[in-house]
Amino acid sequence: MEIAPPSPGSPLLLRVQDLALIRGAAPLRRPFSFDCASAWIAVIGGNGVGKSTLMLSLAGLLSQASGRIFVAKRSSEAGMLLPLTERSQKEKAQSIAWMGQSESINGRWLVADLVSLGRLPWRDQDNSEASGAIHASAQLWIEALGLEALWHRRLDQLSGGERQRVLIGRTLAVDAPLILLDEPSLHLDPLYQMQLSGWLAASASRGQLVLTATHDLNWALSADAVLLLSKQNAPLLARVDCQNLHRAIESEMGGAIEIRALDEQAGRRWHALTRRTVIQK
């Protein structure tokens, strides 16, 4: 089964061929394939459907998964894909940035030092490593995550949401062409959810592909495209304005929600709205 890419004709950053997962819903244990160009893609689906398993597989961290994964080494090499299995460990670390679900960090690390760990795959090229500085292109996500105010604080002084922002920052510091974030909006307050989504929405302009697993439907509908995983149906990858995608999401939610377009000042946006139910007495 082939899943159409969200941006036909664009240079590819990721190609997945005949991937079958050992965990998750039955449709994911059958081989499926898809291509992705630069974009923000939200991965959604119910509990236990295999979102985290898919993300681990794409990161090359689940050796039991079958199939082949091809990734560009740099954003400038879009369309020049090599199998992940033929990359060195250093090249994998440069190609894919990964943040797992509910990662924990402890100790007396300074935020600046922990975020700088994201640059380790590039330490040979970074002249600024000794000073703990971050690549100049990072200023936008540093501002989006509000890390300036935390930069010189210790991790053991931070709240859960602040730690989550630091973990996201460490991942984005890699500046990889493929970024995988499992539940990144978890613990973030509405302000930082909005600011992070704004940064993610510019993924295509930066030549990056970002996949975010999330349970937040309205946050997911801010993405360029959605990859819907199901317990009954084959995976569906479609642009966020696709009506077939909307109907499929509504079906997965048992008809409890409906996807509607709301015209806002910034343009048309899609929202998941709860359907009114009438309780029969």
Image (spheres, rainbow, N blue to C red):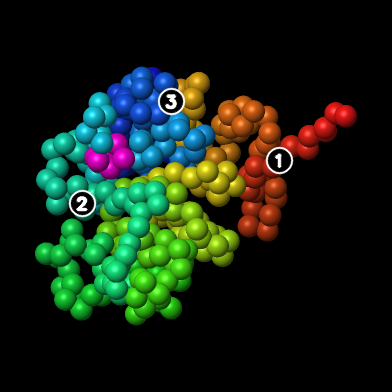
User: Which of the 4 image quarters holds residue 194?
Assistant: bottom right
Residue 40: x %, y % from top left: 44, 47
Between residue 133 and residue 112, name the one nearer to us: 112
Q: What is the distance, in whole Å, between disc 3 and disc 2 at their CAs?
A: 29 Å
Whether residue 135 sits left or right of residue 43 in the image: it is left
Q: Quick one: label 3, few (<14), some, or many (20+) residues within 10 Å?
A: many
Direction from residue 225 to residue 253 in the image, left or right: right
Q: Nearer the viewer, mark 2 or mark 1?
A: 1
**In the rendering, which numbered label is found on residue 25?**
3
Q: Earlier in the sequence, mark 2 or mark 1?
A: 2
Q: Which mark is residue 93?
A: 2
Q: Residue at x 48, y 54 (%)?
A: 186
Residue range in magenta is: 56-61
Q: Secondary structure at mark 3?
A: loop
Question: Pointer 1: what residue?
Answer: 274
Please state the horizontal and vertical placement of residue 46, each as a whole percent of the image: 52, 34
Q: Residue at x 34, y 75 (%)?
A: 154
Give the distance between the C-alpha atoms of the residues marked 1 and 3, in whole angstroms.
25 Å
Q: Earlier in the sequence, mark 1 or mark 3?
A: 3
> Looking at the image, is 10 positioned above or below residue 122?
above
Q: Give the residue type at disc 3.
A: Ala
Name the front one of labels 1 and 3: 3
Q: Earlier in the sequence, mark 3 or mark 2?
A: 3
Taking the image as drawn, is residue 54 in sight?
yes
Secondary structure under the numbered disc 1 in the rendered image: strand
Query: Taking 177 as reference, is 247 above or below it?
Result: above
Q: CA distance from mark 2 to mark 1?
A: 41 Å
Furthest toward the right, the residue is 281
Where in the figure is residue 115, as x and y percent of width and height?
30, 67
| Near-viewer residue (187 or 84) | 187
